[in-house]
Image (spheres, rainbow, N blue to C red):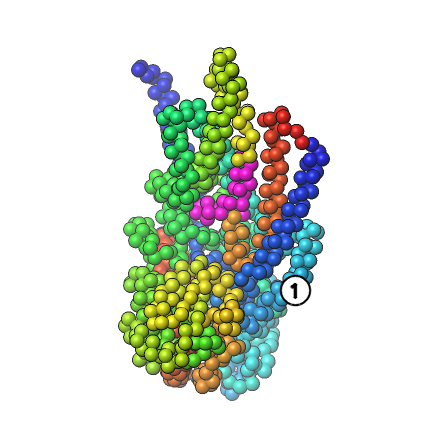
Amino acid sequence: MAAYILRRMLSTIAVMAMVGIFVFLLLRLAPGDPAAMMAGKAATAERIAAIREQLGLNDPVPIQFVRWVRDMLGGDFGISIFAGRPVLELISQRLEPTLSLSILTMILSVTIGVCFGILAAWRTGGLVDRLLTAFSAFGYSVPVFVIGYFLIYFFAIRIHWLPVQGYVPIDRGLGPWFAHLILPTVALGLGYIAFIARVTRASMLEVLSEDYMRTAAAKGASSYAILFHHALKNAGVPILTVIGISFAYLIGGVVLTETVFNIPGIGRLVVDAINNRDYPIIQSVLILTSGLYVLINLAVDLSYTLVDPRIRY
Amino acid sequence: MAISRREIIKTGLAAGAAVSIPAVLRAQTLPADARTVRVVKPGFLTVFDPVATTTYNSADHGLAVYDTLFALDSKFIPQPQMVGKWSISEDKMTYTFELRDGLGWHDGTPVNAADCVASIRRWGQVHPGGQLIMARAKDISKKDDKTFTIALKEPLGLLIDILADLTTPCLFVMREKDASRPATEQVTANIGSGPFKFNHALARPGATFTYDRNEQYVPRSETSDGFAGGKVVKVDRVIWNNMPDQQTAVAALQAGEIDFLSGPPADLYPVIESDPNLELQVLNKAGDVYFLRMNCLQKPFNNVKARQAMLHLIDQEAFMRAVVGNPQYFNTITAAFGSGTPYANDENTGWFKKGGDPEKAKQLFKEAGYTGEKVIILDPTDWHEADVAAQLLADSLRKVGINAELAPSDWGGVSARLKNRGPVEGGGWSIFITNESTFDRSNLFNSTQVANGESGFAGWPKSDEYEALRAKWADAETLDERKALARKMQRLYWNFVGTVLLGQAVSPIARRKTLTGLIGMPALTPMWKMEKA
């Protein structure tokens, strides 16, 4: 197992290196110029050129790349061109909102999605199954911003129960923190509930059709024991995979929810940076996100051993 | 089914708790301090240094944190602000300025004349009017801690107007050590002598910035008037939020989570108007002018006939209907130097015709020798108004037989491509659309009003005759002289067509009725004087 983990960690470095080269080149090849964005709409070409020179953007791309890699290996992810602050400081400011939203969404989605999936598999073909299938289709097909605007209109504007937007750090009180995350979590979680419910249902149905399930039932095992002790454990590997992928996707993919609910998270940081061509932020976030993605996948792979003793690394 | 008394009580308590929890949570999330104003403006603040950029948000930041030597009042007359007394020598070659009492930096040190000298020099690198001052200046130096002089090689009648100019970048006075940096290098210390202190501890770049009332600030004794007069701050704190989704911003305004929203989307005006707690208010009555620039260096617009064709083609009303929608908030415009400004006039505006004149445009394109060259229109899809205008323009051009093609990208892509002066086959461009404050158009130092060819603003129109008049304009001593020159310049401008106007629009702000005292001036929104009930 230790050798496997080491191999995977080494592969993480290779992945991050490839992402780094790709992102760096992509940004330099894509149209756009941070100097022009900084100078403003009415700036002359001479003024933009002077800012480019000041920012070191006129240096040859290979020199810029080597400088970036050297600094990064020394733990310096650079300074934001616009904010003038260290990129790591900006990322750390945005990490808490994104992690809070992602973790709450996963808790909600896994709890409800897995229950819905089990229920649908248990009552397959019945009314409950059809209702849950319809719910899944709804959750999949309605965009997060539609749900978001509806929730804002009803819960914040009409009945004044919850705030429209924003984020309050957890150290300023659990109540305000939670209140600001309820609507975005529900809006974002709906699609994931549907996804996890469908995968759980399919996986459970496959396991429930196995001979040993019929044997367990013939031996008088209760529905609870069949579903939760025998079936769910055996159906766990695909469910864990989906949960892991969903969580990794959430970290980098919550930008729409962050925008609708005005949550200052990582997604918005990257989108703003892309709009402004703030290269150091884009490069650093993508590098760190890719590393996180690989690590989450590794954690998911390792968790398989918990639900399936046949899997060994 | 029998229901016991205990079950009824338990159910009642549970229901009560369930209903009250959200209200309790919400109560904890509302701003407790009624002396805090929360504002949202589109675009947000990305560059802290208001001298390093021309963006209005940075200038708004500058108005809060820094102070200015002079400031324009509501009639656009320069009035002393940091300056207490000033005088001009009899030969009109030397200006002497004395700072007023009570000026201090946010770090506790007093403002010194050396700070002003360094600030003028730095601003003079980037502002066209400032560049003129630097070109004419023999010496700018400190005389004592409170006094400095500007000695000129030749008189400059507009000197005070230029120092007070609100066309960005404005002359914000910074500490000498900050202002000693080149203007290409951002000053991010945010330590000024203005009425608000920038709260570094609460700064969240890209999300929220907080400005606290500067307790030590000594306002002038005169009543606040435009940007001039006493900058009296009546709230403790202003929080500037970045809210990229305008619909969410309007919802937040309705819910009382913010107090002020700049530039709400026009399709949500009815929602705002129907809310008894909200009000739409036009602060910038002069509004903005939308216009297009053509690449005068390349075909077909290197031929003046093709540029004149564009002047006749544009149906301003149709463009403004598409861009703004509600006729209450737009009008057509023919004056080159802004409508409602001191230099607005009707010289040489015979080209304007309601509905445009596509036949005349077609004829002029023919006279220009147009033979089907591709016309590339830069289309910034992340800027709704310009995107809509670009699409309508492409359609209008195609209808008169022009091979028009849209080049969609975000604004970042547009600004990068604007630098390319070459033909469209080499990644160049033919037309781009932008806007600016109407007031800025009356400033002939503004880069978009210059016609000095390749060293000017994108589009690069060139007219030596016009430039000669523009140079005289700076020397004119009276407003009437400048008005007369503006007429002559406009005659030339609409002949060589440096710009084609698409219309003039005002954009109301939305505010909660509890927020009052907002200052209505072009382009910029100061934070002083506002009050919250």
| Quadrant of the snapshot with the N terminus of chain B | top left
Name the spot of residue A22 as percent of width and height, x first.
Answer: 61, 53
Crowd around label 1: few <14 · some 14–19 · many ≥20 (10 Å): few
Name the residue located 50 percent from the left edge and 62 percent from the top edge. Answer: B413
Q: Amino acid at mark 1?
A: Pro
Q: Above or below — where is B225 with respect to B312?
A: above
Name the residue located 47 percent from the left edge and 30 percent from the top edge. Answer: A202
Q: Above or below — where is A206 with respect to A144?
A: above
Residue at the far left in the pictured view: B354
B56 in the magenta segment? no
Residue A257 appears in the rendering: yes
Name the spot of residue B502 as percent of width and height, x first.
Answer: 36, 69
Residue at the far right in the pictured view: A3
Name the residue located 28 percent from the left edge and 71 percent from the top edge. Answer: B355
On screen, residue B348 versus residue A312, left or right, reads left
Name the spot of residue A185 as percent of width and height, x first.
Answer: 46, 39
Residue at the far bottom in the pictured view: B91
Residue B227 appears in the rendering: no
Q: Pointer 1: what residue?
A: A60
- Magenta highlight range: A243-266
On screen, residue B483 versus residue A237, left or right, reads left
> Which secondary structure lies at badge 1?
loop
Q: Main secondary structure of the magenta part?
A: helix
A259 in the magenta segment? yes
Name the residue located 46 percent from the left edge and 83 percent from the top edge. Answer: B463
Q: For residue A58, what is the image quadrant?
A: bottom right
